[in-house]
Amino acid sequence: MSTEKKNSKSRVYVINGPNLNMLGKREPEVYGFLGLDEINRQLAYVAEDLDLELTFFQSNHEGVILDKIHEIFEENPAGVIINPGALTHTSVALRDGLLLLSCPIVEVHLSNIHKREPFRHKSMIADIVTGQLTGFGHYGYHMALNAIHQLLKAV
Ligand code: DQA
């Protein structure tokens, strides 16, 4: 019975790319002092309020992230939040993989990539995702989840 209820919740995948497992230790003046586990823990509270189910995934490997996106494709999720880290600026493969998905996709960056080095201004996925949130620290993930929630309500 309770499994049935759980399965009826809309599932949102939260994908983080290379080096984001080092948040908290990595350039905290740029990315903040919270580790990824803490960011995810806080996001799980937001999800509870919005009645959404989250699945978290992080990898430092492009191919592993692509494999996960292929798995997600088979599951037909309600939404995807992705911070691809440096792959944002380089990965045509990531862009092609995300094009498989028909659900809302929100691109999140803790730092404002447009205020940083010129090579970070270009996102390989910005024009194929639903929207981009950049520069709001870990609140960007909260905003992304709220946006997906609103989009699901509007359907
Ligand atoms: C980042 C920005 C990227 O340029 C960088 O390579 C990261 C993190 C961000 O969250 O601000 O790893 O995606």
Image (cartoon, rainbow, N blue to C red):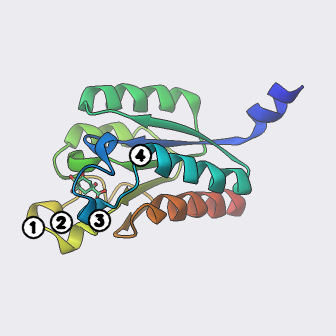
Badge 2 amino acid: His
Of tags 3 and 4, the one toward the viewer is: 4
Q: Is mark 1 within 8 Å of ligand 1?
A: no
Q: Are marks 3 and 4 in contact (CB under 8 Å)?
A: no
Badge 4 amino acid: Leu
Is residue 62 visible to the viewer in this orientation of the structure?
yes
SS class, disc 4: helix
Q: Are marks 2 and 1 in contact (CB under 8 Å)?
A: yes
For the residue pair 37 and 130, the one nearer the viewer reads as 37
Q: Residue at x 28, y 69 (%)?
A: 112
Question: Marks 1 and 4, Cα distance to the nearest angstrom?
Answer: 26 Å
Q: Residue furthest bottom?
A: 115
Badge 1 amino acid: Pro
Residue labelled with disc 2:
121
Against 144, is 26 above or below? above
Q: Is residue 146 left or right of residue 4?
A: left
* Residue neighbourhood size for the residue with mark 3, other residues' Cα within 10 Å, grouped as few (<14), some (14–19), many (≥20): some
Q: Are marks 1 and 4 in contact (CB under 8 Å)?
A: no
Residue labelled with disc 1:
118
Q: Residue at x 16, y 47 (%)?
A: 90
Task: Give the x, y percent position of residue 105.
Answer: 46, 52
* Residue neighbourhood size for the residue with mark 4, other residues' Cα within 10 Å, grouped as few (<14), some (14–19), many (≥20): some
SS class, disc 3: loop
For the residue pair 130 and 110, the one nearer the viewer reads as 110
Task: Give the x, y percent position of residue 38.
Answer: 49, 48
Residue labelled with disc 4:
36
Q: Earlier in the sequence, mark 3 or mark 4?
A: 4
Task: Give the x, y percent position of residue 19.
Answer: 25, 42
Question: Marks 3 and 2, Cα distance to the nearest angstrom?
Answer: 11 Å
